[in-house]
Image: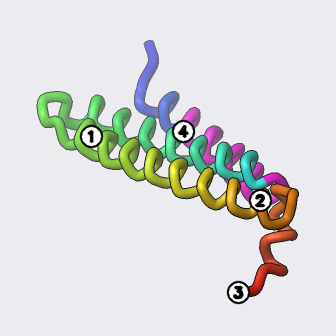
Amino acid sequence: MVGLNHFLILGAAMFAIGLTGALTKRNVITVLMCIELMFNAVTLTILAFNRFTSPTVLTGQVFALFIITVAAAEVALGLALVIAIHKDRDTVDVTAVSGMKG
């Protein structure tokens, strides 16, 4: 039977993979995907806690909806920035962004 520990281990592994990718990759789109992976890990953990602690209360589902909303806004804003940087610098390298002035 799958218990709370299994979901927590999976969530921690997903978060660790996302954090490692966000800190080590140089491509902005890859960094955004790793941040989305971390959001999904947090959502999984919140839903697992809600399911195993108080399944009749919908608090976990409400938090999950907020996380999904924030993640969608982050993707929209992040991709707009990536497009603007690509038009200006012709690259999506993270190190190229640090040199922008204006």
Dividing the picture into quadrants, the one containing residue 26 is: bottom right
Q: Report the Cα–Cα distance between label 1 and label 4.
A: 15 Å
Q: Quadrant of the C terminus?
A: bottom right
SS at mark 1?
helix
Which residue type carries mark 4? Answer: Gly
SS at mark 2?
helix
Of the residues under marks 4 and 3, which one precedes in the sequence?
4
Q: Which mark is residue 102?
A: 3
Dividing the picture into quadrants, the one containing residue 78 is: bottom right
Give the left or right position of residue 94, taking residue 46 as reference.
right
Characterize the local packing of mark 3: few (<14), some (14-19) or many (20 or more) Cα atoms within 10 angstroms: few
SS at mark 4?
helix
Q: Which mark is residue 60?
A: 1
Vertical placement of 100 versus 41: above or below?
A: below
Instruction: Return the residue nearer the eye: 54 or 28.
Output: 28
Q: Report the Cα–Cα distance between label 2 and label 1.
A: 40 Å
Q: Report the Cα–Cα distance between label 2 and label 4.
A: 36 Å
Give the left or right position of residue 73, taking residue 35 as reference.
left
The magenta region covers: 9-27
- Residue on which the image places disc 2: 87
Instruction: Return the residue nearer the eye: 7 or 70.
Output: 70
Give the left or right position of residue 2, taking residue 58 as reference.
right
Q: Report the Cα–Cα distance between label 3 and label 1.
A: 42 Å
Vertical placement of 22 versus 30: above or below?
A: below
Q: Is residue 34 magenta?
A: no
Residue 39 position within the rendered picture, expressed as x and y whole percent measured from the top left? 51, 46
Which residue type carries mark 2? Answer: Lys
Of the residues under marks 1 and 4, which one precedes in the sequence?
4
